[in-house]
Amino acid sequence: MPECRGLGYATEASLALLAKAHHTYAGEILAIIAPENLASQNVCRKLGFTFWKQAPVAGDIRNLYTLPVGGESASGPSVKRWPA
């Protein structure tokens, strides 16, 4: 919905999911985003994900981003707003 873009909803929802993942999972999370979806890529980077590579996913080329969560190696997203 275009009228909801740019209001931070995707970032806030993602922060809630990442907070839960941080407390219940140790490993890496993979984000799969269409190369033309710049808004989602920006949200991903804001959350601390790093670009890994482009690869085919279900027949389409996608950008893959990773983020370590849980355990001692996870540093959390760069926005540093995960609930405790």
Image: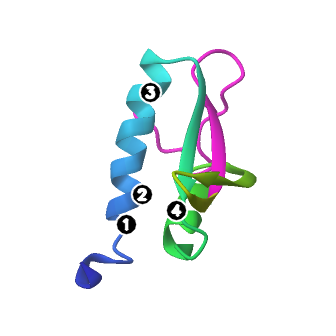
Residue 54 quadrant: bottom right
Q: Earlier in the sequence, mark 4 or mark 3?
A: 3
Mark 1: few/some/many CA within 10 Å (<14, 14-19, 20+): few
Relative side of 24 to 70, left or right:
left
Q: Amino acid at mark 3?
A: Ala
Q: Which residues are magenta?
A: 63-84
**Residue 55 drawn in magenta:** no
Q: CA distance from mark 2 to mark 3?
A: 15 Å
For the point 42% across and 45% down, which residue is it?
Answer: 15
Give the residue pinned by disc 1.
8
Q: Earlier in the sequence, mark 1 or mark 3?
A: 1
Give the residue pinned by disc 2.
11
Q: Disc 1 vs disc 2: Cβ atoms closer than 8 Å?
A: yes
Mark 2: few/some/many CA within 10 Å (<14, 14-19, 20+): some
Q: CA distance from mark 1 to mark 2?
A: 5 Å
Give the residue pinned by disc 3.
21
Give the residue pinned by disc 4.
43
Q: Secondary structure at mark 4?
A: helix
For the point 65% across and 49% down, which residue is it?
Answer: 65
